[in-house]
Amino acid sequence: MIHFLRMIKGTFPTDKFEALDTPFYYYDMTLLRETLDTIRRETVDKPFRIHYAIKANANPEILRLIASCGFGADCVSGNEILLALKCGFPANKIAFAGVGKTDREIHIGLDHEIFCFNVESKPELEVLNELAKAKGKKAPVALRINPNVDAHTHQYITTGLNENKFGINEQDLPDVLRMITDAKHIRLIGMHFHIGSQITDLSSFEDLCVKVLELREWFRTQGITLPVINVGGGLGINYQHPNHCPIADFGSYFRLFDKYLTLEEGQTLHFELGRSVVAPCGSLITRVVYVKEGIRTKFLIVDAGMTELIRPALYQAYHHIENISSEKPYTPYDVVGPVCESSDVFARDQMLNGSKRGDLIAIRSAGAYGETMASTYNCREIPASRFSDKL
Ligand SMILES: *Cc1c(COP(=O)(O)O)cnc(C)c1O
């Protein structure tokens, strides 16, 4: 017997969408609030601190809501720091990561006295020490260490393996520690890790915990205790079933760290979650421009493309797609954009309700690394954003 997964569709205010120009990003702010409440509930009685990773979605409306819930920010550029501050994140909850921090960006961090610089190399440490010295300040630093843990995710989004542009390798640690002892304007407060993104096999985080404990022990043998342990982000979401699983499994995720990473007195555990916070609440809403009958394939040519959402073209990412204007029987389509690149394909053989020119299409789970990665290639416009509580 053939078993069909019941097709549940998301609920969208299609009537209101009809009047709007497409494509645009639509954010379900109720879902975002529920997600933030879940995170808060799962962490409230623990020494856990959440820094939202701004690069996943830097829409000011979204940033203001996340900041209002008391979360900190994880920034990867000077401009992200400035935006985070503008949207209400306090400086003392801002962490700054990145392999190529420029002098200008370091100045921004120092001038605003941010919580922590996540330092990724020896030359960066030297420059940070010099720039802090010129200002008569001490820069708070967490060392980003490469734990050599395989995140079992796509090669473009794995970051924790040894030969990687990110982080400091373990064998360089003794050297780095000597540098820090001599650097009068560096204050070592922690260690930082980030092993990759869209991680759904939680055992990768177990591996990370084992590594963190080993390294904490090594620091102890050097006479150093570090108050801050930052395990980065990376928790994955269910892109296949956005309607069945709208909120990532934060319960299991935080319980895992609680179980495997026993903290010492005065130690706090920091998380930098991006995708899992904002991906599910966002959909890219686009319109069918043409239905083109190929030889074997029916193409839905829509008015959004890789310029609005590059994930499918960049790393073969899957996004669930729904026709929110039609209830006709399901049939397979290739959903493609208008951009002059053969990789401008959102999905092949996607089962959609029978579609016609003008129908509205929702490309789901697009709230992370969607709008922030938009480009103007082909002289296209950056897409607008709409919010469920402001339609
Ligand atoms: C991108 C990034 C994150 C967020 O990763 P997600 O997979 O979106 O949770 C966290 N920390 C650092 C250092 C990053 O570069």
Image: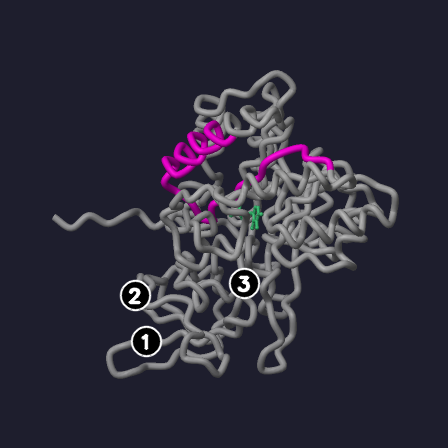
Q: Please tell me whether residue 10 is drawn above or below residue 300 in the rendered image.
A: above
Q: Residue at x 41, y 72 (%)?
A: 345
Between the residue at mark 1 and the residue at mark 3, the CA separation in whole angstroms equals: 20 Å
Q: Residue at x 44, y 59 (%)?
A: 156
Q: Position of residue 276 (x, y in %)?
A: 52, 43
Lower position in the chain sequence, tag 2 or tag 1: 1
Q: Is mark 2 within 8 Å of ligand 1?
A: no
Q: Please tell me whether residue 152 is drawn above or below residue 289 in the rendered image.
A: above
Q: Residues within 10 Å of mark 1 (few under 14, many from 20)?
A: some
Residue type at the position of mark 3: Ile
> Which residue in the structure is indicated by mark 2?
331
Q: Residue at x 37, y 81 (%)?
A: 292
> Which residue in the structure is indicated by mark 1?
298
Between the residue at mark 2 and the residue at mark 1, the CA separation in whole angstroms equals: 9 Å
Looking at the rendered structure, the secondary structure element under dot 1 is strand
Residue type at the position of mark 1: Lys
Note whether residue 66 is visible. no
Q: Residues within 10 Å of mark 3 (few under 14, many from 20)?
A: many
User: Looking at this rendering, what residue extends furthest in the left direction?
Assistant: 1
Between the residue at mark 3 and the residue at mark 2, the CA separation in whole angstroms equals: 20 Å
Q: Is residue 390 magenta?
A: no
Q: Position of residue 152 (x, y in %)?
A: 36, 48
Q: Quadrant of the C terminus?
A: bottom right
Looking at the rendered structure, the secondary structure element under dot 2 is strand
> Which residue in the structure is indicated by mark 3?
285
Numbered range of the magenta stretch: 187-215
Q: Nearer the viewer, mark 3 or mark 2?
A: 3
